[in-house]
Image (spheres, rainbow, N blue to C red):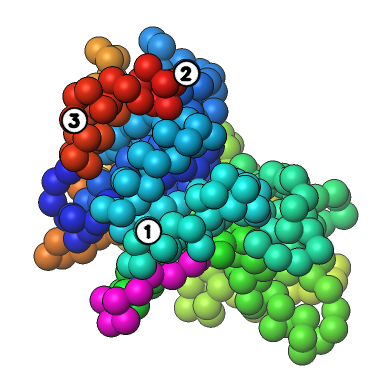
């Protein structure tokens, strides 16, 4: 659909909701021709998610820019045939059904690899394609719960807190899928053959616990909420209340902590960055009282230019206006059906071949069915025949 490092790569996206949608969003931003394969009359469930901008779901708009939409009923023989025809000229198929669903449709990895031996097939699932939990239903909160990530989120002495971001969906599923697809495409350049990418969202979350796992392997002591090295154990690395919100303090290294203590007029705390026991509680209480005396803006101005690793905890509207995020094009202004709209940008910055920062609007359900099928070589009568059969 345009330039970018993945120009010429065609991705058939059968996924629904967040994990696959975000994975193919990244691929589309990098120039791949991402074609959403959706159920006629129904489509990706994300299309129904409120709030709506006119008749468009905000979530659908956020995840599906720069993509095209084709409706195909994969349960009908005619639908299977036309899908295989598309696979023959494509590079990647990505799906997020439970293990076995695509095989029962006759469209699993083995069947599609016979159609196109260069095909990269990526399956995102909660727990992977095998194992005792492979067929269980789940959502992000379940994946991070099993993986041990949910249990370490929260404050000291209190219960687990559900993260505000979907860690399993985005990190364990989407980002891992993108990495796997790119690795498989690179390997294909050498071997000439595609591959099957088995992406488990739980696996991905477990892999993010590398440091925690290392500490546990060394000590055999499970980490405790609010008392880990980087989750509140130390006065030098915590969230503190300001007069109008919160501040993030990350002065881990001695030079940063020392500079912060000097800047706030508390050189007497220079030796307490990693205070423990009663002294830890005293230092935290004193800093809470001190930081609460001024607003985030006042602290930002007072600490400006100093290497103290202190910043505001922004609300989302403040993050939208953040000058660094704006400079890095992490928020893109666009138009959505006559309504001013803001997209998040692509985090991948390539000096020579860059990401696609222009945002084509999200596709309507089946908007590109005729065009895409015509590109595969189907004539008008054939396409109308598929429509009459209810296959598209």
Measure the C-alpha gap from mark 1 to mark 2. 28 Å
Measured as percent of width and height from the top left, residue 294 is found at 53, 41
Measured as percent of width and height from the top left, residue 183 is found at 38, 72
Which residue is identified by label 2?
41
- Other residues around mark 1 within 10 Å, as few (<14) / some (14–19) / many (≥20): some
Magenta stretch contains residue 196: yes
Single out the mark in the foreground, 3 or 2.
3
Residue occupying the point 71% across, 54% down: 143
Which residue is identified by label 3?
379
The residue nearer to you, when weighing 142 against 200, is 200
Measure the C-alpha gap from mark 1 to mark 3. 21 Å
Quadrant of the frame with the N terminus: top left
- Other residues around mark 3 within 10 Å, as few (<14) / some (14–19) / many (≥20): few
The image quarter in which residue 330 lies: top left
Q: Earlier in the sequence, mark 3 or mark 2?
A: 2
Secondary structure under badge 1? helix
Q: Earlier in the sequence, mark 1 or mark 3?
A: 1
Residue 384 to residue 213: above or below? above
Residue 367 to residue 13: above or below? above
Residue occupying the point 19% across, 24% down: 380
Dots 1, 3 in contact, CB < 8 A:
no
Q: Give the range drawn in magenta.
A: 189-197
Measure the C-alpha gap from mark 3 to mark 2. 23 Å
Residue 207 to residue 376: above or below? below
Q: Which of marks 1 and 2 is nearer the N terminus?
A: 2
Rendered image: mark on residue 115: 1
Secondary structure under badge 2? loop
The residue nearer to you, when weighing 6 against 187, is 187
- 91 sits to left or right of 230: left
Secondary structure under badge 3? loop
């Amino acid at each position: 659909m345009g330039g970018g490092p993945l120009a010429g790569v065609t991705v058939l996206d059968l996924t629904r909701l967040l994990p696959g949608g975000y994975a193919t969003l990244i691929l589309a931003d990098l120039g791949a021709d991402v074609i959403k394969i959706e159920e006629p009359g129904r489509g990706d469930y994300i299309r129904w998610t409120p709030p709506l901008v006119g008749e468009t779901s905000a979530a659908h708009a956020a995840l599906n820019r720069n993509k095209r939409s084709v409706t195909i009923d994969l349960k009908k023989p005619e639908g299977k045939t036309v899908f295989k025809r598309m696979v023959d000229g494509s590079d990647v198929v990505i799906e997020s059904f439970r293990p076995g669903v695509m095989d029962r449709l006759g469209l699993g990895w083995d069947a599609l690899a016979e159609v196109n031996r260069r095909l990269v097939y990526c399956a995102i699932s909660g727990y992977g394609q095998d194992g005792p939990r492979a067929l269980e239903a789940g959502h992000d909160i379940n994946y991070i719960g099993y993986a041990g990530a949910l249990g370490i989120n929260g404050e000291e002495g209190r219960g687990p807190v559900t993260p505000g971001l979907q860690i399993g969906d985005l990190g364990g599923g989407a980002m891992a899928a993108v990495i796997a697809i790119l690795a498989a495409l690179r390997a294909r350049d050498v071997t000439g053959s595609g591959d099957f990418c088995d992406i488990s969202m739980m696996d991905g979350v477990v892999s993010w616990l590398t440091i925690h796992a290392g500490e546990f392997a060394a000590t055999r002591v499970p980490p405790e909420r609010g008392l880990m090295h980087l989750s509140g154990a130390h006065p030098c690395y915590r969230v503190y209340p300001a007069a109008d919100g919160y501040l993030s303090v990350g002065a881990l290294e001695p030079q940063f902590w020392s500079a912060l203590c000097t800047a706030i007029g508390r050189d007497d705390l220079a030796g307490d960055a990693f205070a423990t026991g009663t002294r830890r509680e005293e230092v935290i209480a004193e800093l809470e009282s001190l930081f609460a005396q001024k607003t985030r803006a006042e602290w930002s101005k007072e600490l400006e230019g100093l290497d103290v690793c202190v910043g505001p905890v922004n609300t989302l509207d403040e993050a939208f206006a953040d000058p660094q995020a704006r400079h890095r094009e992490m928020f893109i202004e666009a138009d959505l059906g006559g309504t001013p709209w803001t997209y998040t940008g692509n985090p991948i910055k390539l000096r020579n071949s860059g990401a696609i920062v222009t945002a084509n609007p999200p596709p309507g359900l089946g908007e590109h069915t005729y065009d895409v099928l015509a590109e595969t070589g189907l004539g008008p009568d054939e396409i109308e025949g598929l429509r009459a059969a209810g296959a598209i």
